[in-house]
């Protein structure tokens, strides 16, 4: 894994963890506007990082990866290998 690939992968992992933690907080504090804004900001950061990662290194998940007439999820290197 190149340094750039590892950097993006780790960013996605960290932001995903932050989103999970914030989501749990929002479960018990649903009217906390600051927390909701923070969660939405992290959604944007994660979406951009995932888009950049997938454009450079291939898909991260199999969800939504059925493009065309064949199953091609396993055609690119898997990020965890």
Image (cartoon, grey):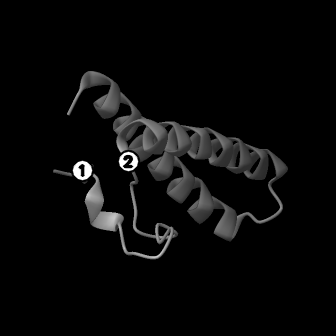
Badge 1 element: loop
Number of other residues with Cα within 10 Å of mark 1, as a class: few under 14, some 14 to 19, many 20 or more: few
Residue carrying label 1? 77
For residue 5, side relative to residue 51 (left or right)? left
| Mark 2 residue crowding within 10 angstroms, few (<14) / some (14–19) / many (20+) | some
- Which residue in the structure is indicated by mark 2? 58
CB under 8 Å between discs 2 and 1: yes
Which of the two residues, 13 or 76, is positioned nearer the viewer here? Answer: 76
- The residue drawn where x is 54% and y is 43% is 51
Which numbered disc flags the more N-terminal residue, 2 or 1? 2
Can you tell which quarter of the image residue 31 is in?
bottom right
> What is the distance, in whole Å, between disc 2 and disc 1 at their CAs?
7 Å
Where 47 sits versus 52, above or below? Answer: below
Tell me if 2 is positioned left or right of 42 in this view. left
- The residue under the point 61% across, 38% down is 45
Query: Residue 74: x and y, percent?
Result: 27, 64
């Amino acid at each position: 894994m190149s340094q750039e690939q590892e950097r993006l992968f780790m960013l996605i992992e960290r932001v995903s963890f932050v989103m999970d933690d914030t989501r749990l907080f929002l479960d018990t504090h649903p009217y906390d506007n600051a927390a909701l804004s923070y969660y939405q900001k992290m959604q944007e950061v994660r979406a951009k990082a995932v888009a950049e990662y997938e454009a450079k290194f291939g898909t991260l998940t199999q969800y939504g990866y059925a493009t065309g007439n064949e199953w091609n999820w396993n055609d690119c290197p898997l990020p965890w290998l």
